[in-house]
Image: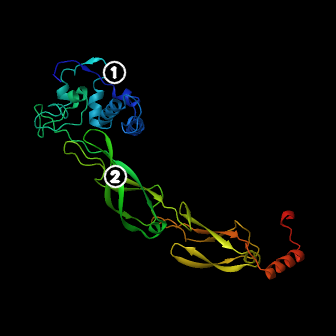
Amino acid sequence: MIRGVPLEYKDYYQILGVARDADAGAIKSAYRKMARKYHPDVSKEANAEDRFKDLQEAYEVLKDPEKRRAYDQLGSNWRAGQDFRPPPGWENFAGGFAGGHAGSAGGPDIGGFSDFFEELFAQQRGRRGAHGGAPFRTRGEDSEAEIQIPLEDVLHGAKREISLEVPVHGPDGRMYRERRQLSVKIPAGIAEGQRLRMSGQGQPGQGGGPNGDLYLRVRYAPHPQFRAEGKDLYHDLPISPWEAVLGASVSVPTLDGQLRVKVPAGSSSGQKLRLGAKGLPAPKGDKAGDLYAVLQIVAPKQISEAEKALWERLAAESSFRPRNE
């Protein structure tokens, strides 16, 4: 744009739908919610692409404490769409941002933001500009993805090579998914929902700024024998009717081998046998979880004539009436 020509004022708080005193967490949450709604790849709104660009521009300013402070200095009396000129002396107040226009000779384009943004926060040419401001450098935004890990890795810890898709901003301002190969160190005892930080694997920075970080949120992969609840593990242990009545010594699987446990005489389905500290490990100083063998009485589906006779004799001899107990 030509300096001195009125611009259309953009109310970044209104665009994101947050109050002017919103904290960084509220601003980030609002941006993510609305960006999902208006992302051009998924939105059916007619003006999705323009709305998405406005959202990115608003978030670019409000997520950065210095740019937000400079923007707030304009005051809260402006209305979106009003003609606007930067106030006298603005270039001195925003010296760290003002200078040549984005895309001008010697300076890269900052991503197709509006004239309003460019006038207020124009990219510096790769050295200090005419007003003495520092080059415009912005750290890339952090990204988040989810990984599943087997319970055995939680028990022992592991180093894994994983392939996953990471959301990244393209040069046209749109969000894309990029497949990456990463080497991930999984510490023993990591909790479900905990995040692993991959330094420098997030969104690229602008103006030579550093990349953001990638946070991998951990989920436990389904296991054929165990289910995890916190640090405790549960295993459904099948036993025969006579083992339940008479008691028995049976083998129970754990994550690191088999153990023998005693099934008490007179056990019932659903009864739990506790194996102390045989669950998942905990961080240093904390107690490991337990393993619970949950008894499941299983009746035979096919029996011989001799076995049938024994069961019939037992039924006739026994005084046990479970529905009367």
Residue 157 sits in quarter: bottom left
Q: Residue furthest bottom?
A: 306
Q: Is residue 128 left or right of residue 324?
A: left
Q: Quadrant of the N terminus?
A: top left
Residue 27 sits in quarter: top left
Please state which of residues 120 and 148 is positioned toward the viewer in this rendering: 148
Whichever of callouts 1 and 2 sits on the residue coming sooner in the sequence is 1
Give the residue pinned by disc 1.
80
Amino acid type at image mark 1: Ala
Give the color scheme: rainbow, by chain, secondary structure or one colour: rainbow
* Relative to 297, residue 8 above or below: above
Which mark is drawn over residue 283? Answer: none
Decide: marks 1, 2 in contact (CB < 8 A)?
no
Q: Position of residue 285 (x, y in %)?
A: 47, 66
Tell me the crowding category of disc 1: few under 14, some 14 to 19, or many 20 or more residues within 10 angstroms, Cα based. some
Q: Position of residue 227 (x, y in %)?
A: 56, 63
Q: Residue at x 22, y 18 (%)?
A: 6
Q: Residue at x 84, y 63 (%)?
A: 323
Q: Quadrant of the C terminus?
A: bottom right
- Per the image, label 1 sits on a secondary structure element best described as loop
Give the residue pinned by disc 2.
214
Q: Is residue 137 left or right of residue 20?
A: left
Q: Is residue 5 left or right of residue 224?
A: left
* Relative to 24, residue 186 above or below: below
Q: Position of residue 147 (x, y in %)?
A: 42, 57
Q: Residue at x 12, y 31 (%)?
A: 131
Amino acid type at image mark 2: Leu
